[in-house]
Image (cartoon, rainbow, N blue to C red):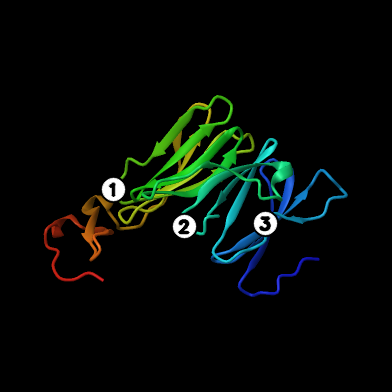
Amino acid sequence: VFEEKSAQFNVALQKSSNKGYISLHVDSKDENEIYLLDSSNKEETFRLVRKRKKGIKYFLKDYKDSFFILSNLAGDGNKYELFKSKKEDIFSANWEKIISYPSDTLLKSMTVIGDHLILLEEVKMKAHIKIIDQINGRVDFIQSDSTEVYQLDLLGADDGENTLLKYSVSSPKFPSITYAYNLKSKETSILERKKVKGYNPDEYETKRVYAPAEDGTRIPISLSYKKEAEGEFKGKMF
């Protein structure tokens, strides 16, 4: 019986996408640890992958004989990198870094659907989805053609055949739209479009502007306003 004594942590059980592993997740805001159980081995017990450490988080996705690992092992807050490990090495420190990013790029999320590694990346505050075919190395991108200010989220697989990727796009201008992307045909369809009664998004505009800080850093600011108010911005912003 597993018992987490700290009220700061949540505990959850998950099955891996190919149902080869059961994982026990112990999570808080800024640290976590994962225990793995090989579901094919009746003699197996849960084993700790990596002990929790303040400021460090890691997330696993299994693929064939390996794991892909999303982690901020360097201890740099939200600066995540991508690692890979053979399954027999996942409990050791032998994680191979396979993707690192420049300072203006963030790796926000990661998943695996079939033979596709799927990454949610953000470059200079604009997000896109990168899809890497693990068989032939082909790389495809999903980018929003909506307003400059938007949020892109990975929602995972949409079918049992590992062919559809679900993702959503939203912004201050329009409610969330959920899409399905076919990993084989590369076609996109809309699954759900949320509507707000009495609201017309065509009456509004959104944009991103930048304000210089004292040290020269450009601070991004997202604006959402009625088009008729264009040019009337005055005063201070908090």
Percent coordinates x, y for residue 151 in the rendering: 39, 51
Say whether residue 91 is left or right of residue 119: right
- Disc with the residue nearer the chain's start (1 vs 3): 3
> Could you tell me if residue 152 is visible in this image?
yes
Q: Secondary structure at mark 2?
A: loop
Residue holding disc 3: 50
Q: Which residue is mark 1?
A: 148
Residue 78 is tagged as 2
- Image coordinates of residue 136 in percent, x first then y, are 55, 24
User: In what element is the residue under mark 1?
Assistant: loop
Quadrant that contains the C terminus: bottom left
Name the residue at the left extreme: 231
Depth check: give the residue in front, 24 or 225.
24
User: Which label number is shown at residue 109?
Assistant: none
Depth check: give the residue in front, 137 or 102: 102
Residue extending furthest top? 136
Name the residue located 27 percent from the left edge and 59 percent from the top edge: 217
Q: Residue at x 56, y 60 (%)?
A: 56
Which numbered disc flags the more N-terminal residue, 2 or 1?
2
Q: CA distance from mark 3 to mark 2?
A: 19 Å
Name the residue: 44% across, 45% down: 101
The residue type indicated by label 1 comes to Glu
The amino acid type, in three-letter code, at marker 3 is Arg
Residue 19 sits in which quadrant?
top right
Residue 84 position in % (x across, y down) = 61, 42
Q: Can the viewer see residue 192 in this picture?
A: no
How far apart are labels 2 and 1 at the CA level?
Answer: 22 Å
Badge 3, how many Cα within 10 Å: few under 14, some, many 20+?
some
Query: Given the image, on which type of amino acid does mark 2 rest?
Result: Asn
**In front here: 83 or 116?**
83
Q: Is residue 45 left or right of residue 235?
A: right
